[in-house]
């Protein structure tokens, strides 16, 4: 009895992997990848099929996306500037590994952190941030999630602090104005004299009310 061999199943991405490709607008084109990764395609494999490797795409990735000069790119890839120019002009085929290396660098967290504002910062192997000013920082992902609330509280405190500063400045100005009115000793003495004089007048008025003075008779 002759045995019938079952036809080999064609390697293809799983339904979830196809959905991920569709959501990321990536068209899988490599048959070698489908055979090597039957079913599930890791994210980094999916992204490797995002862009066709061409001189235009290489220049766009290097210059417009990553903001690198030819000299910097050539130095990083360990090739000469001449070789890089030949890639970008189409005189030589761009190696897949060179293009893929730039793409992976761009999509890495290390590249995002490699900005002039983050000079000296890096991420340790255990995921902790390391600052050139304070060293290792015990910062966890939930700390970053709470930053927006912390910043909101900070802004509220700053606004309240500004209001208090303005109120203190107004009171200080009023106090200085009053001090200027009484700093002049002559004004103080004059006010005291007026006060005493008013007291004497009130005393005389009260005395006149109590003692009725008879008019003095004129001599004949």
Image: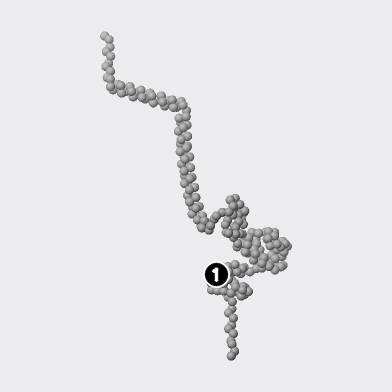
Instruction: Give coordinates of residue 31: x percent, y percent.
Output: 62, 75
Q: Nearer the viewer, residue 35 or 212?
A: 35
For this view, does 93 lie left or right of residue 214?
right
In which quadrant of the rendered view does residue 91 lie?
Answer: bottom right
**From the viewer's perspective, is residue 102 above or below residue 10?**
above
Instruction: Give coordinates of residue 75: x percent, y percent.
Output: 70, 60
In which quadrant of the rendered view does residue 104 lie?
Answer: bottom right
**From the viewer's perspective, is residue 55 above or below residue 121?**
below
Q: Is the residue marked by circle 1 packed among few (<14), some (14-19), or many (20+) residues within 10 Å?
A: some
Q: Say what secondary structure mark 1 lies in.
A: helix
Q: Is residue 50 visible in the rendered structure shown here?
A: no
Q: Which residue lies at the image location 59% right of the left edge and 50% below the top edge?
A: 133
In which quadrant of the rendered view does residue 192 lie?
Answer: top left
Instruction: Give coordinates of residue 45: x percent, y percent.
Output: 60, 69
Q: Quadrant of the N terminus?
A: bottom right
Q: Which residue lies at the image location 60% right of the left edge and 58% below the top edge?
A: 124
Q: Nearer the viewer, residue 134 or 21?
A: 134
For this view, does 32 lie left or right of residue 188?
right
Q: Which residue lies at the image location 47% right of the left edge and 46% below the top edge?
A: 160
Q: Which residue lies at the image location 57% right of the left edge and 74% below the top edge?
A: 39
Residue annotated with mark 1:
20
**From the viewer's perspective, is residue 163 above or below residue 96?**
above
Instruction: Give coordinates of residue 43: x percent, y percent.
Output: 58, 68
Q: Quadrant of the C terminus?
A: top left
Q: Is residue 196 visible in the rendered structure shown here?
A: yes
Q: Nearer the viewer, residue 39 or 116?
A: 39
For this view, does 183 lie left or right of residue 118?
left
């Amino acid at each position: 009895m002759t045995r019938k061999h079952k036809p080999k199943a064609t390697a293809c991405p799983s339904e979830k992997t196809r959905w991920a490709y569709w959501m990321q607008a990536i068209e899988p084109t490599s048959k070698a990848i489908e055979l090597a990764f039957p079913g599930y395609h890791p994210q980094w494999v999916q992204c490797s099929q995002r862009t066709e490797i061409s001189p235009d795409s290489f220049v766009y990735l290097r210059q417009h996306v990553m903001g690198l000069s030819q000299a910097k790119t050539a130095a990083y890839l360990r090739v000469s500037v001449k070789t890089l120019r030949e890639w970008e002009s189409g005189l030589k085929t761009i190696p897949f590994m060179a293009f893929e290396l730039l793409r992976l660098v761009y999509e890495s967290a290390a590249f995002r952190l490699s900005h002039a504002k983050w000079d000296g910062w890096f991420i340790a192997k255990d995921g902790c941030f390391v600052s050139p000013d304070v060293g290792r920082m015990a910062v966890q992902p939930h700390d970053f999630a709470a930053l927006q609330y912390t910043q909101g509280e900070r802004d509220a405190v700053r606004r309240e602090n500004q209001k208090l500063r303005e109120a203190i400045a107004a009171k200080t100005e009023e106090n200085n104005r009053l001090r200027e009115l009484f700093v002049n000793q002559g004004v103080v003495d004059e006010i005291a004299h007026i006060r005493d004089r008013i007291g004497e007048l009130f005393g005389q008025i009260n005395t006149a009310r109590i003692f009725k003075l008879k008019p003095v008779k004129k001599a004949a």
